[in-house]
């Protein structure tokens, strides 16, 4: 039984992938972890990257060298990697390259619910959207061929529900890895304007071919159904909820299942011509529905997330889709009134909590509204009992937003960032602040791991102090503290001193994540037993 | 056969081991399985659930529609009630009675018990005490699973085989403990049913 994420990894490995690149991010993390769990180190590269941009570029480099590569990320990670992503569509690929992006509708573990299919359309590359674990495997397996056939990167788009759901998967023949081979065209990867214009023209020219691929793809199908009062277009995972809405999974209407983009216009036109009205069911934004409506709308009614037949925001589920077909709302048991919310919280003994208790005390004199934070477990410091932070926007934004606020006159401004996030996107912002000696204090709450996503290794380990010195932070304003309750008085004093300092300062609060510590101890124990 | 199960608990309580054991037992009987899990932020002490669907026919949705779950298996009493809208009229709610209190406004335990008693088909058990008697509090989730096994149409032996497969690499002693926990849970449920 494989998670959707694991099925993607398995499909890529069986298709002869030579390397996978990623930064951990829910719900995409398990793709890379699966490859790592197999111990293929000698044959398949699978180390974590510093961020999604470095991952995307490394994958492109591996493709340049003729090998099949994969890069994985969560939806917002694609924003970080957008520059190489967009340009990889222009350069094209040499070895097949597949970009697996996991979206998170309903924001189970994310800051937004952006729909990566738009990015695929934006870059003009094929997007595959599996509806189940088997398709996740099959589509990834075939995506590499598609990528090499048109010398173009291919995106696999999944959402949380498939990423983190298990089912049985049948495997296909294992293909050998590609041989090392540099591109035949020596200027393919040089995007100087003169060359880029040619490459871009070629990308535009192959669009009809990609559309034909979609129309002929076994992953897109138009099935009968005699009741043509309604024609249904359903994308990816939503297909399951459609089936679940009818007895024996028998849908009385014609159904166009779309799992490969660009949109198969011919099939859509066929469905449109034979149906009185159209219902579009898609997970994420109303991408297909908007395309159908165009600017001026159509003669026939188009139903979906835009006209309120389905909710405009949030993840779909079988109940929501059933209601679109007129099922009454559920009237069974209710959640009893005494059931309380149970939001996630920092673990017992977590070092971040000691950082926040000390910080709250150190900042009491300045009042609220001065602590900028970032993405990680420590974002939970926004909730009681801490109420310690005022922002959480995107990876690395704590340092740069604190700098901007200080530029505006909010002095002192303080930021809290984790070790892994600091490596991901914090270092460059710190350099901005160093150059202007901005009056901010950067607290790196260093638990020596990427904890929120399950404790992956952090590139920061053992390097934070030297990185800060290298970036030019004055050595006497790089302070270490040990975030334990018994050191609270010392920690408050150190924080007070650095917050009062009228220039850049960094406080590194280092203590292992409690889960990491437990793992380390278990390993030590099992090592000493053998 | 069809069995739609919601597993409930708090992040870190081990509902995924229950899910894996049921999944293994189902596969041994050549049944279709889909199992939706929660990963990410909620695993940090938040409410977590897993939708587990088993069927002799193909399964479409990874998620169980409301009012169609045959079972709620919970390792925590308040969490068992959070998913009541998914329980069918004939469905069973099986829960550990030991609260996991990590929020300031956790309800009164006696009121919780009363509310659970309002569910027509319910069974609560002190799985933690049973597990402690066995020598490891960790196996309390297997006591709860054991109590649920009479309500899943899969031979009991398959659950035992599943546990052997899942815990095998952890050693014979761990396997024995988990099997014993499963048995006691099963016996309790059968005694309750009589």
Image (cartoon, rainbow, N blue to C red):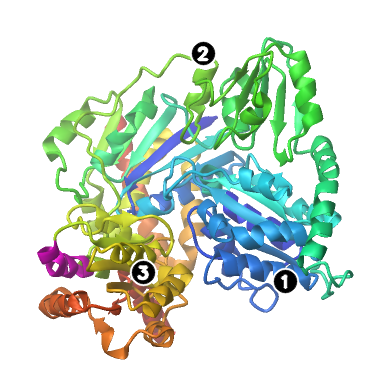
Residue A455 shows up from this direction: yes
- On screen, residue A139 versus residue A79, left or right, reads right
- Quarter in which the C terminus of chain B is drawn: top left
Q: Residue at x 29, y 37 (%)?
A: B80
Taking depth in this image into account, of A434 and B48 the one nearest to the observer is A434
Question: x and y percent of residue A381 in the render?
Answer: 25, 58
Whether residue A510 sits left or right of residue B41 in the image: it is: left
**Would residue A167 be seen by someone viewing this image from the given angle?**
no
| Element assignment for label 3 | strand
Measured as percent of width and height from the top left, residue A256 is found at 72, 27
Residue A326 image label? 2
Rendered position, A18 above or below A474: above
Q: Position of residue B59 (x, y in %)?
A: 59, 33
Q: Residue at x 33, y 51 (%)?
A: B141
Q: Is residue A359 magenta?
A: yes
Which label was assigned to residue A418? Answer: 3
Q: Which of the numbered marks, if any, corresponds to residue A62? A: 1
Judging from the image, what secondary structure is the residue with disc 2 in?
loop
Q: Is residue A163 above or below residue A505?
A: above
Could you tell me which chain the residue with mark 2 belongs to? A
Pointer 3 local density, CA inside 10 Å: few below 14, some 14–19, many at least 20? many
> Tags 3 and 2 in contact by the CB under 8 Å rule?
no
> Relative to the observer, which residue lies in front, A431 or A178?
A431
Q: Position of residue A121 (x, y in %)?
A: 68, 44
Label placed on residue B12: none
Query: Which secondary structure class fits the magenta region best?
Result: helix
**Region of the chain picked out in magenta, as a range:** A354-366
Identify the chain of the residue marked 3, using the numbered disc in the image: A
């Amino acid at each position: 039984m494989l998670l959707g994420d694991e099925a993607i990894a398995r499909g890529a490995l069986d298709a002869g992938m030579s390397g996978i690149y990623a930064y951990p991010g829910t719900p995409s993390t398990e793709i890379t972890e699966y490859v790592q769990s197999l111990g293929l180190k000698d044959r398949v590269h699978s180390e974590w990257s510093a961020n999604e941009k470095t991952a995307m570029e490394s994958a492109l480099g591996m493709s340049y060298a003729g090998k099949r590569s994969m890069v994985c990320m969560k939806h917002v990670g694609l924003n970080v990697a957008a520059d190489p992503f967009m340009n990889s569509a222009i350069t094209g690929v040499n070895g097949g390259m597949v970009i697996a992006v996991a979206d998170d509708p309903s924001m189970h573990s994310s800051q937004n619910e952006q729909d990566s299919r738009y990015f695929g359309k934006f870059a003009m590359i094929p997007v595959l959207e599996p509806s189940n674990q088997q398709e996740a495997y099959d589509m990834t397996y075939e995506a590499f061929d598609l990528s090499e056939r048109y010398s173009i990167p291919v995106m696999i788009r999944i959402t949380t529900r498939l990423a983190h759901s298990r089912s049985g998967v049948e495997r296909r023949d294992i293909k050998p890895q590609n041989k090392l081979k540099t591109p035949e065209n020596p200027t393919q990867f040089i995007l100087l304007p003169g060359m880029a214009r040619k490459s871009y023209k070629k990308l535009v020219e192959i669009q009809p071919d990609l559309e034909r691929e979609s129309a002929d793809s076994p992953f897109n199908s138009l099935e009968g159904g005699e009741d043509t009062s309604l024609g249904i277009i359903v994308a990816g995972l939503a297909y399951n909820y459609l089936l679940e809405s009818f007895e024996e999974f028998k849908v009385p209407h014609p159904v166009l299942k779309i799992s490969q983009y660009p949109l198969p216009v011919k099939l859509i036109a066929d469905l449109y011509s034979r149906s009185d009205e159209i219902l579009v069911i898609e997970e994420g934004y109303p991408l297909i529905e908007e395309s159908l409506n165009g600017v001026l709308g159509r003669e026939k009614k188009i139903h979906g997330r835009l006209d309120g037949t389905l909710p405009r925001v949030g993840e779909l589920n079988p109940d929501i889709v059933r209601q679109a077909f007129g099922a009454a709302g559920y009237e069974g048991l209710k959640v009893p009134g005494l059931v309380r919310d149970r939001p996630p919280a920092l673990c017992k003994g977590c070092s971040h909590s000691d950082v926040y208790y000390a910080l709250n005390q150190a900042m009491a004199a300045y009042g609220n509204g001065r602590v900028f934070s970032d993405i990680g477990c420590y974002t939970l410091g926004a909730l009681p009992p801490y109420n310690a932070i005022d922002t959480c926007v995107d990876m690395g934004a704590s340092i740069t937003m604190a700098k901007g606020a200080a530029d505006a006159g909010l002095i002192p401004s303080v930021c809290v960032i984790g070790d892994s996030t600091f490596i991901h996107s914090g270092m460059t912002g710190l350099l901005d602040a160093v150059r202007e000696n901005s009056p901010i204090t950067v607290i790196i709450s260093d638990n020596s791991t990427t904890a929120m996503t399950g404790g992956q290794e952090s590139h920061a380990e053992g390097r934070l102090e030297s990185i800060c010195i290298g970036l030019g932070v004055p050595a006497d304003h790089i302070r270490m503290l040990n975030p334990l309750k018994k050191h609270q008085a010392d920690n408050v004093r150190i924080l007070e001193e650095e917050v009062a300092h009228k220039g850049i300062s960094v406080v590194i609060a280092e203590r292992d994540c409690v889960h990491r510590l437990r793992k380390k101890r278990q390993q030590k124990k099992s090592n000493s037993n053998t | 056969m069809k069995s739609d199960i919601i597993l409930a608990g708090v992040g870190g309580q081990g509902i995924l081991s229950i899910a894996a054991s049921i999944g293994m037992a189902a596969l041994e009987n050549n049944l279709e399985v889909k199992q939706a899990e929660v990963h990410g932020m909620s695993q940090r002490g938040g409410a977590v659930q897993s939708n587990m669907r088993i069927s002799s026919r193909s399964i479409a949705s990874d998620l169980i529609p409301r009012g169609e779950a045959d079972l709620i298996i919970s390792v925590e009493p308040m969490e068992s009630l959070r998913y009541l809208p998914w329980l069918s009229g004939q469905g069973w709610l099986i829960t550990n009675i030991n609260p996991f209190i990590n929020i300031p406004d956790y309800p009164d335990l006696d009121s919780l018990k009363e509310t659970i008693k309002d569910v027509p088909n319910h069974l609560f058990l002190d799985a933690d005490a049973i597990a402690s008697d066995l020598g490891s509090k960790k196996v309390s989730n297997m006591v709860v699973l054991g109590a649920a096994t009479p309500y899943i149409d899969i031979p009991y032996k398959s659950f035992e085989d599943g546990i052997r497969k899942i815990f095998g690499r952890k050693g014979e002693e761990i396997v024995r403990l988990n099997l014993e926990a499963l048995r006691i849970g099963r016996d309790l449920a059968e005694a309750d049913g009589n």
